[in-house]
Image (cartoon, helix red, strand yellow):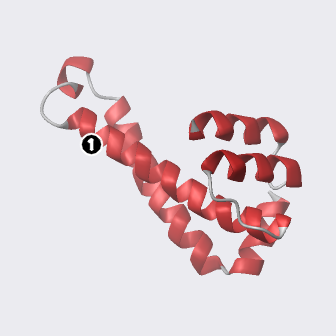
Amino acid sequence: MAKIDEICRQYGVALCYLFGSQQALGLARLRRLARMDPAEFLLNDTPAIAESCLRRSLGAMFDLSRHAAAKQAGKAAVEYKQIARQLGQSGVVTPALGEKRVLMAA
C-alpha cells in the first residue's frame, strides 16, 4: 500500500480519486448484480450492463496503472498486459497480483 500512497502523492489525489471512483462505482454495481437471482439476471439487458460495468472498472484500473507504471519505470506501456507486468516488476503491486492483472488483460 505504501507504493500506492506514494503514487497518489506524486500524481495528485485528484487523479487517483477520479480513476478509483470510476472503478468503485462499477464494482459496487457489479456486486449488486451478483446478488441477483440467475433467472432475473438473464432478463432484459442485465448481462450487457454487467459487461459494461466490468469493462469500465477494468479500464479505470488499467488507466491508473498506466500512470503508475510510467512513473515507476520511466516509460509508458501501451498494452494492458505490459502495464500489469511493469507494476509487478517495479513493486507497485505484488508479482502475484501483477500476474493476475496480466490474465485480466487477456
How many numbered marks are there? 1
Residue sitting at x 78%, y 53%: 87
Q: Using the image, determine if residue 54 lies above or below residue 91.
A: above
Residue 82, given in percent of the width and then of the height, sits at 71, 49
Residue 38, given in percent of the width and then of the height, sits at 26, 19
- Residue found at the very far top of the displayed protein: 39
Which three-letter amino acid code belongs to the residue tagged 1?
Answer: Ile
Q: Using the image, determine if residue 104 lies above or below residue 60.
A: above
Quadrant assignment, res 73: bottom right
Res. 103 visible in picture: yes
Instruction: Locate the C terminus by quadrant.
Output: top right
- Residue found at the very far right of the displayed protein: 90
Residue sitting at x 41%, y 38%: 31
Residue sitting at x 68%, y 68%: 67
Identify the residue under disc 1: 49
Q: In the rendered view, does 86 fall on the left or right side of 51?
A: right
Judged from the image, the secondary structure of the residue bearing numbered disc 1 is helix
Residue 18, given in percent of the width and then of the height, sits at 51, 71
* Number of other residues with Cα within 10 Å of mark 1, as a class: few under 14, some 14 to 19, many 20 or more: some
Front-lying residue, 7 or 34:
7
Q: In the rendered view, does 41 fall on the left or right side of 83?
A: left
Res. 93 visible in picture: no
Residue 86, given in percent of the width and then of the height, sits at 79, 52
- Residue found at the very far left of the displayed protein: 44
Front-lying residue, 58 or 83:
83
Residue sitting at x 75%, y 42%: 98
Instruction: Locate the N terminus by quadrant.
Output: bottom right
